């Protein structure tokens, strides 16, 4: 059985949110270390190191946001943000772009699947993923069938 999704677009705002969230998770250890240092300095009283630690924490978050924003704007490929739909069967997920281009990916190639209430992130490797919104499915039956396909892989 083939599942066909509705046509949807992958916007820069959505890409930024996913990229920032993933970057934040990968660098959580550094943020935790800065928070512990700030807490330690706070327990000893006010000091210039407390301000430096808080500034470092804020600066790191700003650095992450700027880095993610530059990466989002660097995507010059017109297909990256183009309208697309998917055809999904038990072996292959085929991305169909509005201009007729097709890109098949084997279902076995997905290393990790992240499910949020609004979308799926189907990871091929650590940084390369396919975005599939829940709203793109034509019916609840198609969504359940897709979840069953993903769980069986």
Image: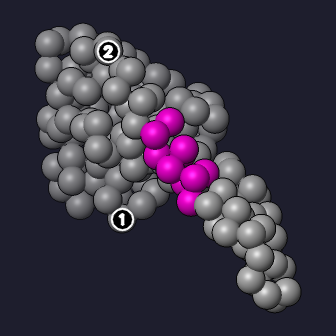
Mark 2 or mark 1, earlier in chain: 2
Specify the quadrant of the image occupied by residue 56: bottom right
**CA separation in Å, label 2 and label 1:** 29 Å
Question: Where does residue 128 sit, x and y in percent of width and height?
Answer: 53, 30
Instruction: Using the image, tell me which numbered label, if any, was put on residue 146.
Output: none
Residue 34: in sight, yes or no? Answer: yes
Kindly check if marks 2 and 1 are in contact, taking CB atoms under 8 A apart as contact.
no
Residue 152: in sight, yes or no? Answer: no
At 50% from the left edge and 25% from the top edge, which residue is drawn? 106
Please indicate whether residue 66 sits to the left or right of residue 88 in the image: right
Please indicate whether residue 34 sits to the left or right of residue 16 in the image: right
Please indicate whether residue 64 sits to the left or right of residue 118 in the image: right
At 36% from the left edge and 21% from the top edge, which residue is drawn? 75
Question: Where does residue 72 sit, x and y in percent of width and height?
Answer: 38, 31
Instruction: Using the image, tell me which numbered label, if any, was put on residue 117.
Output: 1
Question: Where does residue 10 sit, x and y in percent of width and height?
Answer: 26, 36
**Bounds of the magenta span?**
57-67
Toward the viewer: 10 or 88?
Answer: 10
Vertical comparison of 120 with 37: above or below: above
Please indicate whether residue 31 sits to the left or right of residue 103 in the image: right
**Residue under circle 2?**
76
At 34% from the left edge and 27% from the top edge, which residue is drawn? 73
Toward the viewer: 5 or 20?
Answer: 20
């Amino acid at each position: 059985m083939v599942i066909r999704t509705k046509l949807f677009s992958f916007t820069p705002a959505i890409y930024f949110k996913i990229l920032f969230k993933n970057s934040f998770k990968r660098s959580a250890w550094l943020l935790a270390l800065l928070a512990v240092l700030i807490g330690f300095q706070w327990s000893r009283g006010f000091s210039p190191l407390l301000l430096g630690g808080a500034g470092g924490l804020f600066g790191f978050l700003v650095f992450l946001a700027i880095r993610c924003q530059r990466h989002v704007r660097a995507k010059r490929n017109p297909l990256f943000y183009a309208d697309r739909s998917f055809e999904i069967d038990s072996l292959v997920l085929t991305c169909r772009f509005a201009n007729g281009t097709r890109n098949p990916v084997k279902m076995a190639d997905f290393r990790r699947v992240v499910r949020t209430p609004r979308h799926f992130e189907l990871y091929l490797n650590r940084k390369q993923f396919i975005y599939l919104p829940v709203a793109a499915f034509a019916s609840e039956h198609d969504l359940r069938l897709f979840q069953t396909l993903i769980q069986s892989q």
